[in-house]
Image: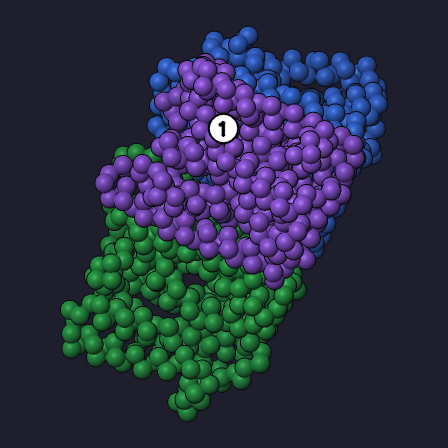
Chain colours: A blue, B green, C purple
């Protein structure tokens, strides 16, 4: 507890933890005040995600490189996973899919673009390891391709087409998890030297004792799950109040909230001229959503969801994912960056956000 | 006037200026001879575009690097802009959009491909600055993406969809102009050293006095506007007479006519083994059409057009723009070229041109 | 004959030649046992393809680099061509198109991916000539683009649209063959030094005398044609028996059978750490299908087919070809490979194969 207080004093973001009890109080007092509950839950998830990310790293630091890397890779998107699981359980499949697509787009465009922009405001031209970045961009590209197929080959909504989409989604999920497992062997075992920069990301921080870290990991995951429930319940009606479309909320708001902790790490890396770290976090996190979170959600929909979920996305989301991945590949594979590259990537993100904000609901 | 005569003797292309008065005589004598007027106006626009380009450079050379670069960047596609504005005023929005898409495709495929081919016929392998080319290709890619979005997310032609497309096009235009302004700051101020090769393109020519250049700039712009009016009026009926589809005229004929002057510069660079220059002109000009000309046309359609114009293109045009941009990125990012690369890029252009030529009118 | 026996003892694959007479016996004895005939003809085509490939190389080795290269380039996909011609003559245009698209996808994804994987299991990181690989990937990309156009611009199946598609396909075929001829001049005459690695692929083998090689070339081509006839006749009903969709058979089975010989060469190159060779075979073979086999089939459909064949592919096939080409460009242009890159490329191939396997027949 003492340690937590030190941490809070150290990281101003954690003052937002005060909103966690506020969410629960809010829900008891006024369960119908959706807009307020939405704002409170957003503000509460951000510091919880930061704690989760920090605790994962602390456990990872204690358990040696391989197991630690495994933990980092698996729990790195825990916040996104818990939010998506809550939405899955509530049967809000459109929100689940939008949050998956949105996390990929947000990580590749906003996180990468803002890292380039932030770094570029301090450094004239930043160099980073082109080979590693291109490898990661290739993985991300291949991972995204898998998500595009069910939308690309779909046609009439006939009965055989529905069965086809369901079987295809199941098979894809299996192949994606296989690719993810192979990727783990690759980056943690056979070719770990290619990924060194990312592993030693936060070595300047004082690590937590492993017992504390594990307790925080468990406790905070429960808190995220509880707050996510309020978030998922309130998000639709709050969206209406704010004049936001459901697509915008799922794609942009959920992705920004869920990825806040990783963004903090990526931006801090850019400021310290360690762009390898920023690129690794942004592309690695996007790959992980595509290769691990998406298929796990499909498989879990058979267990906890009201019906099986497939991997068929809204065509606009498919185009955005494909453009985001291509953009990331282009800019990351050059190995150099300047502020304007970051600005342009953010503008592409703004174009997507604006499109989703303006989209008439029927079109989604 | 004396100077103009020297220039004409120096540049054989300028003998075509004789067609400028011919256009006006032609329109007075036979306002219904559309085919003749079309041919005359095409022949008249080519030398006017060359003069416009030369005058812009002369003014730019006198006003210092930054303001000069600004002028060059803004007025570099003045011919295309004036032709498109004339078509806009006449309410021919399909022609306007086709000419925007066609200018992007023609600059990235024909201008780049012919530069590679022309250079490759003299030099075995030509090298050029890969980093700059890749940066420019990235900008072009990001610029093109913005134009694709309204076509990608459109669906039924219902009333909310129409309002959505209009709002989206307005917002996109704002973001594109912002990107354009940032690009100017980047290439003229913070990172001008990356763009040096392009700036000193024509330093071997004798520059005009700035007063003469300004006068020519103003006078020729008026002439281009007047000739464009004849061109736009006659183009549809001439197209029928030549058996050309409207899509072919907008995409191919207008783009080749409007870009003739830049092509002359790009090809001359390739012949002198200065492929950096050719790549810079081709990709820079295409980026400028996407980032500046297209949004300005949308905004001006509210002022001078009969109705607001949106940025929704015919899907075939979107695919061609995307393929052209990807092709340019591929070949430009390798940093090496040989004649066959140029030949293949031109063949892709011929494929597009043939497709548009054969296209049944209803499909566009 | 003695030489053939030595060869068979040397290459275990050639024991499969025993299935060639088995096919003919099978067809006489039980012309309705489609499943058996299908399996027999598949097993018979594989060794014939290997012999064909070996004979072509032997003739090429004797006739000097230029003519030899020409022969290699033209006859390298002879098996695919003969199978497709047999299907063309039988009027099975869907099978022809599926086999063309499938050969491109299989060569770029499976052949390339398995080469990377096989090489990566022995060598930690393999390097290859990035410039040549990127050049070949560019050619392949441009070649594929041509095949996409008729599908991209098609719309209603009206009468003018049908005539448009036919004219467009004819024009495209002409341009593709022009590109192919230029590519030959480029790789065999003006820039042969860029392609050296591939030419000296099998210099450790004992070459056949040219007379024997020519006789084998002629005789085996006839055998392939005869076996292909059985294959094409039996494939549809066998597919039903195996629960395979026609798309899966055309795309995957025909492509794997027809490309077996080239795959053996590519994999052997990867095992010997000569990845330049593997990349050259995989991308070169795919380019050749797009630039030579596809247009020749269109042109020959006017002579030997029941009706003109166009180049309009099923949209799903177009997307797969485009993704395969982009994937190959990404991974080949990095110039480095490790086992995981190969594994991921194969997983993309498995995703496509699974999609085609599951596809309800109406959707194709």
Relative to the observer, which residue lies in front, C205 or B210?
C205
> Which quadrant holds residue C274?
top right
Apparent side of residue C201 relative to residue C171 in the rendered image (left or right): right
- The quarter in which the C terminus of chain A is drawn is top left
Say whether residue A171 is visible. yes
Find disc 1 in the rendering and name its residue: C227
The residue at 38%/24% (across/down) is: C363
Q: Is residue A329 above or below residue B335?
A: above
- Residue C208 in the figure: left or right of residue B311: right
Q: Nearer the viewer, residue A163 or C213?
A: C213
Measured as percent of width and height from the top left, residue A106 is found at 57, 34
A277 over B241 or under it: above or below: above
The residue lying furthest to the bottom in this view is B2
The chain letter under disc 1 is C
Which residue occupies 37% across, 73% down?
B46
- Rendered location of residue C254, percent (x, y): 51, 29
* x, y percent for residue C210: 64, 47
Q: Residue furthest front?
A: C2
- Residue A50 versus residue C11: which sits nearer the camera? C11
Q: Quadrant of the N terminus of chain A?
A: top right
Q: Residues within 10 Å of mark 1 (few under 14, many from 20)?
A: many
């Amino acid at each position: 507890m003492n340690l937590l207080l030190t941490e809070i004093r150290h990281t101003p973001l954690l003052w937002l933890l005060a909103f966690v009890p506020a969410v629960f109080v809010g829900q008891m007092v006024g369960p119908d005040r959706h807009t307020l509950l939405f704002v409170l839950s957003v503000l509460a998830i951000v510091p919880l995600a930061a704690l989760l990310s920090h605790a994962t790293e602390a456990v990872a630091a204690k358990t040696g490189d391989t197991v630690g890397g495994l933990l980092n890779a698996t729990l790195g998107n825990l916040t996104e996973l818990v939010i998506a699981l809550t939405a899955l359980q509530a049967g809000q499949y459109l929100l689940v899919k939008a949050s998956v697509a949105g996390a990929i787009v947000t990580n590749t465009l906003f996180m990468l673009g803002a890292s380039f922009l932030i770094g570029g405001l301090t450094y004239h031209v930043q160099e980073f390891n082109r080979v590693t970045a291109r490898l990661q961009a290739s993985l991300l590209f291949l991972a995204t391709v898998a998500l595009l197929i069910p939308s690309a080959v779909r046609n009439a909504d006939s009965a055989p087409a529905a069965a086809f989409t369901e079987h295809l989604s199941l098979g894809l999920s299996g192949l994606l998890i296989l690719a993810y497992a192979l990727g783990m062997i690759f980056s943690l075992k056979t070719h770990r030297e290619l990924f060194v920069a990312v592993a030693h990301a936060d070595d300047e921080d004082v690590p937590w004792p492993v017992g504390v870290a594990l307790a925080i990991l468990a406790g905070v995951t429960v808190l995220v799950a509880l707050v996510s429930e309020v978030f998922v319940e309130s998000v639709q009606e709050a969206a209406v109040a704010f004049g936001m479309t459901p697509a915008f909320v799922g794609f942009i708001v959920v992705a920004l909230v869920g990825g806040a902790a990783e963004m903090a790490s990526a931006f801090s890396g850019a400021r310290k001229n360690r762009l390898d770290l920023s690129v690794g976090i942004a592309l690695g996190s996007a790959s992980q959503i595509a290769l691990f979170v998406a298929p796990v959600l499909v498989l879990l929909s058979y267990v906890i969801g009201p019906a099986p979920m497939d991997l068929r996305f809204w065509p606009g989301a498919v185009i955005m994912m494909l453009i985001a991945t291509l953009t990331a590949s282009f800019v990351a594979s050059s190995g150099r960056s300047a502020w304007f590259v970051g600005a342009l990537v953010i503008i592409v993100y703004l174009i997507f956000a604006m499109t989703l904000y303006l989209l008439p609901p029927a079109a989604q």
